Amino acid sequence: MTASILNRIIAERPAHDGVLTVAGLGHRRAMPLAELHDRARAVAGALRRGGIGEGDRIGVLAANRIEWILLDLAALMLKAQTAGFEPGKFTPDAELVERYGLDQLYTDAPIPDGAPPAVRPIAEIARHADEDPPEIHAPLWEPEDCTTVKFTSGSTGVPKGLEATVASIDSSLRDVQGMFDHRPGDRLLVFLPLSLLQQRYWLYSALRWGHDLVVTTYQSVFAVMPAVEPTVVMAVPGFFDSARRHLEGRLADGVDAAKAAAELFGSRIRYLWTGSAPADPAMLRFFTEAGLPIFEGYGLNETCIATKNHPGAHREGSVGKALPGKEILIDADGVVCVRSDHPVNTAYTFAAPGESERMFKPGGLVRTGDLGHLDEDGYLYIHGRSDDVIVLDNGKKVVVRPIETRFRDTGAVAECVLYCRNQTGLVAVVSPHPGPVDRAAVAAALAAVNAGSEPDERISRVITADEPFTIDNGLLTSQFKPIRGRILERYRDRIADPKEGLHAR
């Protein structure tokens, strides 16, 4: 498969001047991508001496760091598979090694007593990277080979594992490059966990097309951005919601819009990229009107990027048109289905019985579970999750996402999640902003949302969460989506008690 982008970046030391920067609070390290390639070959040599080779599986349980990147490239060079585990959701112990068939597991977490020798500190990779790089004659990856196991965000139960094919990765890289033409002089910023395979796509893109890449963490991103001056920021809508609130505060202080944007993002932004969760239309308009073009797309782990707005093909309110080799279908229930010429896969690798059959359908079709429609020009619009439809006792079906979005758009709360007690009325659990709760603002938001809603869509009560929803307290996914099941579990008693919360008037 000589045309494969992955095979090319493995075999060819970069001849361009692209640079990788890994940054955090109080530290920053930059290196030419050519040097990164050399250091990855040195790590590959060390892994090979340790018995790792074609067909083996290397687990990585660590926050974003240079060693993560080196391990990923070294595994590609050896035709070994990686398994990326999101920090905080897994323990580096014998059970993890056995459950996922890991030949080695590298981690930045404390290694528990009794862990097998396969569990190793990821810091040792830096020592191997300093060695002289050997020649690596890697076998070519074939289109249906799987380079990695990626996992669902794990909002409920044990995360499902999904192996990703080379053909799916190559096609996504090629299609995105065709839309956005990332090139020398561009600097792409990545801060979501590298355990999410799509975040590593930008590393492969940088190696192939010569743009710069900055890798940081979500804890550090706001401190890092203005210093590294990215041209492209890729983030979930929750990140841009926070950025919008910050900018609105600066504008209220009388700061010029261009200056405020440069203070936050740096002065070189070419465009902003968002996806992975529903985006607030008001937020998208805010950035566009501020001179920061933002393009929303759509995709799942199981489909990779399926649709994308981009320069020359952008329609407000939509998530874009299908990429080449992707087809969007709407089934009889209004659920979005995606067919791919190069599927990510056709089944889960690690999942409970029946899970694969619920998602993957015959003919390479993925039933996403999202409700949507296509307009006459092929632009896709997403309305919410099929399992976010609440059926009231009068038979009325309520799609909760638009109501939740309207509540969040008031600015009184950071998030809103709707539930239905005994199918008789909607109850909102809202995530407050940090600091004291402005109960008057929440009451005004409730009144405003209800005033613009049909009777069956009005919220009867609002319960303010004890603390903001965060990744650390387990109420947001790594992509900043509220985890409905966990929020319900935590606030079930208050939702069920008709006396609890702020009542609508």
Image (cartoon, grey):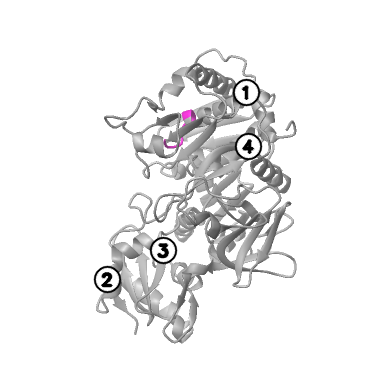
Callout 4 secondary element = loop
Q: Which amino acid type is marked by label 1?
A: Ala
Q: Circle 3 is placed at which residue position?
A: 415
Q: Which amino acid type is marked by label 4?
A: Asp
Q: Name the one closer to the observer, 122 or 203.
A: 122
Q: Circle 1 is placed at which residue position?
A: 34
Extent of the magenta region: 62-67
Q: Circle 4 is placed at which residue position?
A: 145
Q: Position of residue 371 (x, y in %)?
A: 57, 68
Q: Which amino acid type is marked by label 2?
A: Arg
Callout 3 secondary element = strand
Quarter of the figure with residue 184: top right
Q: Is residue 97 above or below residue 477?
A: above
Q: Circle 2 is placed at which residue position?
A: 494
Callout 1 secondary element = helix
Quarter of the figure with residue 115: top left
Q: Position of residue 460 (x, y in %)?
A: 36, 80
Q: Residues within 10 Å of mark 3 (few under 14, many from 20)?
A: many
Closer to the chain start, of discs 1 and 3, is 1
Q: Is residue 136 above or below residue 454?
A: above
Quarter of the image for the N terminus: give it: top right
